Image (spheres, grey):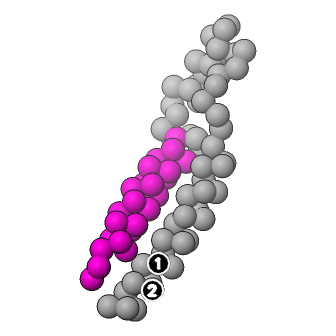
């Protein structure tokens, strides 16, 4: 069981570094002055799920869930 705990701890450390990097790569939610003139409604705004920004958002969600689950599993006394 100790080997499993070590492997899960290493995995948690790797996930935390990747999670931090992906969060830092994302753009802010403020639309800036482009929202006043309607420039925020572009092709990339409509198809956000297929863009790099949408991919980063989905990956952030998955890594966040994995981080929480691994943290809870490592907190159990097994």
Please name whichever residue, 67 or 27, is drawn nearer the observer in this view of the structure.
67
Q: Position of residue 11 (x, y in %)?
A: 48, 75
Determine which residue is flagged by label 2. Answer: 6
Determine which residue is flagged by label 1. Answer: 9
Question: What is the secondary structure assignment of the residue under circle 1?
Answer: helix
Please tell me which residue is depicted at 44% across the width and 84% down the height of the picture: 7
Instruction: Indicate the quadrant where residue 64 lies.
Output: bottom left
In the rendered view, would you say 57 is above or below 37? below
In the rendered view, would you say 21 is above or below 3? above
In the rendered view, would you say 15 is above or below 46? below
Please tell me which residue is depicted at 37% across the width and 74% down the height of the picture: 74
Magenta part of the chain: 54-78
Q: Position of residue 67 (x, y in %)?
A: 44, 62
Please tell me which residue is depicted at 39% across the width and 84% down the height of the picture: 5
In the rendered view, would you say 10 is above or below 47? below
Q: Residue furthest top?
A: 37
Q: Position of residue 66 (x, y in %)?
A: 40, 62
Residues at circles 2 and 1 in contact by the CB criterion of under 8 Å: yes
Question: What is the secondary structure assignment of the residue under circle 2?
Answer: helix
The N terminus sits in image quarter: bottom left
- Dominant SS in magenta: helix
Q: Residues within 10 Å of mark 2 (few under 14, many from 20)?
A: few
Q: Residues within 10 Å of mark 1 (few under 14, many from 20)?
A: some
Q: CA distance from mark 2 to mark 1?
A: 5 Å
Give yes or no for residue 65 being in the magenta stretch: yes
């Amino acid at each position: 069981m100790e080997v499993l705990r070590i492997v899960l701890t290493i995995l948690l450390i790797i996930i935390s570094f990747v999670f931090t990097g992906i969060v830092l790569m994302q753009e802010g939610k403020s639309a800036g002055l482009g929202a006043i003139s309607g420039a925020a409604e572009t092709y990339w705004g409509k198809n956000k799920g297929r863009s790099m920004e949408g991919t980063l958002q989905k990956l952030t969600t998955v890594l966040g869930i994995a981080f929480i689950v691994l943290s809870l599993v490592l907190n159990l006394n097994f």
